[in-house]
Image: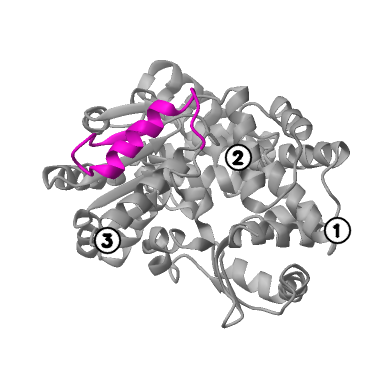
């Protein structure tokens, strides 16, 4: 077994197949768990969960199932530690340090990144940055669709720098988490500590930076952090699903900063690259997979590296659990599972409201409340109502109930007003389009 993330995938397969956890419950409670680490000596598995309510629900309803799964997969018992984000901040800060260990080596090194015509430029640029931080390309901006290897390169850069410059401080952060940290620092009056943390690092790696778009306080803070690091000749590497010019709700000055370095895109892998990825993944985890099956997978899944690797992991999980060797029927079943897993989850009012609240820096509860009538809430609430109407099948009456039991006529008027505003205000249209894009990709 390659690492704990591989082990966690197998545990999840066990929970679904053997414990018969229904799909709705799995997506609600299990799929949102992030594996943090495993300590065989202490017999402890550490998992990250979104919040306290989620943690208590898992403890009350699922803990015995987890323990059975651990024993089935690893052959021994483990205790479980559930962390929530505020408790796991130190683990997040040390993420790259932890990930460079043998436990997660495969996914985050240059040696295991398969280079092809679709990604060789981005790979070469990343290697140059890792070998000469802040000297080659600064910032380096990697962009491309989800599942093509941007995060792999980001970690590989960090790992390489940590090996050649062990005294360097390296921080990896997701754009969304950066925004959330800013909000928390403002609420807790700890902005000075926040700035010290990010502006005194040697290497800043930001994944999915597009998620800071539209958030004024986040962009302002990121702009000054960027300038402080750049002026101090510190390395900055950013990834996004689109080039800076297409992040429509990004401020012009921040877009300019992103474009002042090197932009490198990653395209969909060709057939030869897909074959190499499948074979390399199978080799790493010790799965026997003949050329015919590799070719079949490569021809079925053409646009997403994560899906290719996911099929191989599914086949390995099946072998570990049932000792069934890969066959065409099992490959087809695994492909079907992967495609189903990648189907976007149902869009909920909660998810939409959360993204709108993050974009405008307001409280999500205020957006849904009938009582909150503050001026800064009105426009975000109207946009949230409009997007709910656009992305869900809820009736006007049902949408009204979700937003403080407002009358359906109020909802009708709100939707019509936003439609009119979007036509007349290109900036608002861009903001709404970016919010919708982010919601669909979360």
List x then y, in percent, for residue 256. 23, 28
From the image, state whether disc 3 or disc 2 is nearer to you.
Answer: 3
Circle 2 residue: 306
Q: How many marks are shown on the rendered structure?
A: 3
The residue furthest bottom is: 42
Q: Secondary structure at mark 2?
A: helix
User: Does the magenta-highlighted stretch encompass residue 354?
Assistant: no
Q: Residue at x 70, y 34 (%)?
A: 393
Q: Quadrant of the C terminus?
A: top right
Residue 210 at what x, y percent from top left? Answer: 40, 36
Disc 3 packing (10 Å; few <14; some 14–19; many ≥20): few
| Crowd class of label 1 (few under 14; some 14 to 19; many from 20; radius 10 Å) | few
**Is the residue 368 above or below the residue 3 in the image?**
above
Name the element at disc 1: helix
Where is mark 1, residue-wise? Answer: 322
Give the residues in magenta.
114-142
Picture residue at 64% right of the left edge, 57% below the top: 6
Residue 347 falls in image quadrant: top right
State the residue at coordinates (20%, 54%). 199
Q: Is residue 242 above or below residue 152?
A: above
Q: Position of residue 361 (x, y in %)?
A: 37, 47
Distance of label 3 from label 2 (alpha carbons):
30 Å
The scheme the figure's colours follow is one colour
Task: Tell which tag, 1 or 2, sits nearer the viewer.
Answer: 1
Q: Mark 2 Cα within 10 Å, few/some/many (few <14, many 20+)?
A: some
Horizontal placement of 307 versus 52: left or right?
Answer: right
Q: Which residue in the protein does label 3 denote? A: 166
């Amino acid at each position: 077994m390659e690492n704990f993330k591989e082990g966690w995938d197998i545990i999840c397969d066990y929970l679904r197949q053997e414990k018969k956890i229904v799909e709705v419950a799995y997506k609600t409670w299990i799929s949102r768990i992030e594996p943090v680490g495993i300590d065989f000596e202490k017999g402890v598995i550490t998992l990250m969960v979104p919040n306290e309510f989620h943690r208590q629900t898992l403890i009350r309803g699922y803990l015995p199932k987890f323990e059975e799964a651990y024993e089935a997969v690893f052959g021994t018992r483990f205790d479980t530690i559930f962390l929530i984000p505020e408790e796991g901040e130190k683990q997040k800060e040390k993420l790259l340090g932890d990930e460079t260990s043998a436990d997660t080596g495969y996914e985050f090194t240059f040696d295991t990144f398969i280079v092809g015509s679709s990604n060789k430029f981005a790979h070469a640029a990343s290697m140059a940055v890792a070998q000469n931080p802040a000297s080659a390309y600064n910032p380096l901006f990697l962009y491309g669709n989800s599942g093509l290897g941007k995060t792999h390169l980001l970690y590989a850069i960090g790992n390489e720098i940590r090996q050649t410059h062990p005294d360097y401080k390296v921080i990896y952060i997701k754009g969304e988490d950066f925004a959330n940290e800013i909000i928390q620092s403002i609420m807790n009056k700890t902005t000075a500590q926040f700035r010290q943390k990010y502006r005194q690092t040697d290497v800043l790696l930001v994944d999915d930076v597009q998620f800071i778009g539209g958030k004024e306080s986040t962009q302002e803070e990121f702009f000054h952090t960027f300038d402080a690091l750049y002026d101090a000749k510190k390395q900055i590497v950013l990834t996004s699903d689109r080039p800076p010019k297409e992040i429509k709700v990004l401020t012009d000055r921040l877009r300019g900063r992103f474009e002042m370095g090197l932009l490198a895109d990653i395209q969909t892998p060709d057939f030869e690259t897909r074959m190499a990825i499948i074979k390399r993944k199978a080799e790493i985890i010790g799965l026997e997979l003949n050329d015919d099956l590799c070719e079949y997978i490569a021809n079925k899944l053409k646009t997403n590296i994560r899906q290719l690797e996911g099929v191989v992991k599914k086949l390995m999980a099946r072998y570990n659990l049932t000792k069934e060797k890969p066959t065409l029927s099992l490959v087809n079943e695994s492909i079907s599972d992967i495609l189903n897993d990648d189907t976007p989850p149902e869009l909920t009012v909660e998810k939409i409201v959360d993204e709108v609240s993050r974009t405008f820096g307001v409280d999500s509860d205020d957006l849904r409340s009938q009582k909150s009538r503050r001026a800064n809430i009105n426009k975000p609430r109207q946009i949230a109502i409009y997007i709910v109407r656009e992305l869900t099948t809820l009736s006007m009456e049902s949408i009204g109930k979700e937003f403080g039991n407002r009358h359906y006529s109020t909802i009708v008027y709100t939707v019509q007003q936003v439609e009119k505003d979007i036509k007349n205000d290109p900036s608002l249209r861009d903001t709404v389009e970016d919010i919708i894009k982010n919601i669909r990709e979360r």
